[in-house]
Amino acid sequence: MMQDFYGGNDYMHIGDNAQEIQEVSLPVQLGALLKGGEMTDVVIQVNEELFHEHSSILGARSPVFKEELSGSVFASKVITIKDKKRKVFKYLLQYIYTDTIDGRNHGIPSSNLVRHLLVAANRYGIKGLRIKCEEKLIKDISMDSVWSCFIFGEENNCSKLKEACFKFTTVGTNLAKLVFTEEYLQFMQNYPDLVAELRKRSMLL
C-alpha cells in the first residue's frame, strides 16, 4: 500500500523499511544521546557519582525535575540526590530517555530493583514508569513473594498489584499453603484490613 504524503510524486511505502525506521526512532536516538553524553547542560549527583544530562528532556518527562530545573531554584545547574541507589537512578534515566526498562543497557531489573524504581517513579511523577513497574511486579508474583508484594502494594498505593495478590492467594490451594508461613503471621499482625478482605474472598480463613 502506498500513501502520498506530499501531493506530488514522492511516495513512502508503509512497512517496507521497518528496520530502518526502528533504527532512527526517537527512543533509539535519545538512548544514544543518553549513552553518548553529548550537549548536556545539567549535572545530577547521586551519592558520589555524577550524571551529565539534558535539562529539557528531564523537565519534559518529569514535573518534579521540571520544577527543580526552572528559575532561581536551578541557579547552580547541579541537582543532588542522596536517597537513591546508583543503579535505580540509571534505570530511571533509561526510562526518561527511551520509554523502556527492558535492560538493553543495564540488564533486566530484578523485582527488588523494580520496587525501588516504582518508588522513584512516584517521587518524580513519572506515571508511565510507575505503570510499567507495577505490571512487572504483577508478573513476578510467586508463592515466595506474594505477602511482600501485598505489603509493597499497600504502602505504595498500587491497587492493581494488590488485586493481583488477592487473586493469586485465592487460586486453587495457594492460600491453604500460604497461611502456614512465617510471612503470613507477620502479615496478619501488621495488616489486619488486608486480612479481613482476604476473609471475605475465601472460606479458608
Image: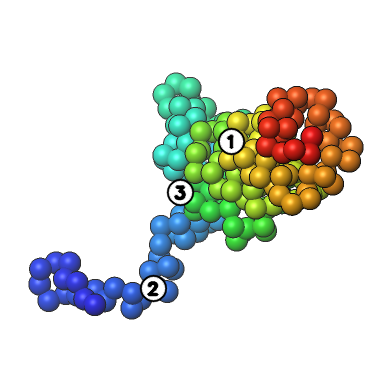
Q: Quadrant of the N terminus?
A: bottom left
Q: Position of residue 163 (x, y in %)?
A: 62, 40
**Residue at image point 43% right, 27% down:** 70
Q: Quadrant of the C terminus?
A: top right
Q: Nearer the viewer, residue 147 or 7?
A: 147
Please report whichever mark, 1 or 3, sits nearer to the chain's N-terminal start.
3
| Kind of residue sitting beneath label 1 | Ser
- Contact (Cβ within 8 Å) of mark 1 with mark 2: no
Q: Position of residue 38 (x, y in %)?
A: 49, 52
Q: Secondary structure at mark 1?
A: helix
Q: Which mark is residue 18?
A: 2
Q: Which mark is residue 39?
A: 3
Tell me which corner region of the image, top left, top right, bottom left or bottom right, holds residue 112: top right
Please report whichever mark, 1 or 2, sits nearer to the chain's N-terminal start.
2
Judge from the rendering whether residue 84 lies leftward or rightward of residue 186; answer left or right: left
How dense is the environment of label 2, judged by Cα within 10 Å: few (below 14), some, or many (20 and up)?
Answer: few
Q: CA distance from mark 1 to mark 3?
A: 40 Å
Q: Is residue 45 above or below residue 30?
A: above
